[in-house]
Image: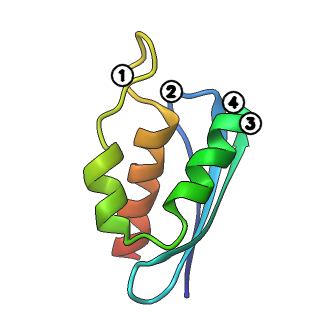
């Protein structure tokens, strides 16, 4: 199993906790801070998906005028998790 606690940058959420198996299949995602309902939905939707699929779908999403978003920061966390 792989585990990372990623400190976000530029979003309302402050931390993303991600667990994936050795094949980069996401087992669990939890956000600290941010829009609780939306982030619970994202967490459940990505569970069971391969990290690469999530990265390809969610990378680059912006939140309003911000250059990033919670989904985009999740992708950054997944990239680090894959390289760990």
Secondary structure category for the residue under label 1: loop
Secondary structure category for the residue under label 4: loop
Is any atom of residue 23 visible in this view? yes
Find out whether the residues at labels 4 and 3 contact each other: C-beta distance under 8 Å: yes
Distance (Cα) linking label 4 and label 2:
14 Å
Distance (Cα) linking label 3 and label 1:
21 Å
Is any atom of residue 6 visible in this view? no
Q: Earlier in the sequence, mark 4 or mark 2?
A: 2
Disc 3 crowd rating (10 Å Cα; few below 14, some 14-19, many 20+) is: few
Outermost residue toward the top? 65
Find out whether the residues at labels 3 and 1 contact each other: C-beta distance under 8 Å: no
Find out whether the residues at labels 2 and 1 contact each other: C-beta distance under 8 Å: yes
Quadrant in the picture for residue 68: top left
- Residue drawn 39% across the image and 51% down it: 75
Quadrant in the picture for residue 63: top left
* Residue wearing tag 4: 35
Distance (Cα) linking label 1 and label 4:
17 Å
Query: Residue 10: which numbered mark, if any?
Result: 2
Residue 52 percent location from the top left of the image: 29, 65
Query: Residue 67: which numbered mark, if any?
Result: 1
* Residue wearing tag 3: 36
Q: Earlier in the sequence, mark 1 or mark 4?
A: 4
Closer to the camera: disc 2 or disc 3? 3
Residue 65 percent location from the top left of the image: 40, 10
- Residue drawn 38% across the image and 87% down it: 23
Q: Earlier in the sequence, mark 2 or mark 3?
A: 2
Distance (Cα) linking label 2 and label 1:
8 Å
């Amino acid at each position: 199993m792989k585990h990372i606690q990623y400190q976000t940058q530029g979003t309302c959420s402050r931390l993303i906790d991600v667990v994936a198996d050795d094949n980069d299949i996401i087992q669990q995602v939890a956000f600290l801070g941010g829009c609780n309902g939306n982030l619970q939905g994202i967490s459940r939707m990505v569970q069971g998906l391969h990290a690469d699929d999530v990265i390809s779908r969610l990378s680059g999403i912006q939140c309003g005028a911000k250059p990033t978003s919670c989904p985009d920061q999740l992708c950054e966390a997944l990239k680090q998790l894959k390289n760990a």
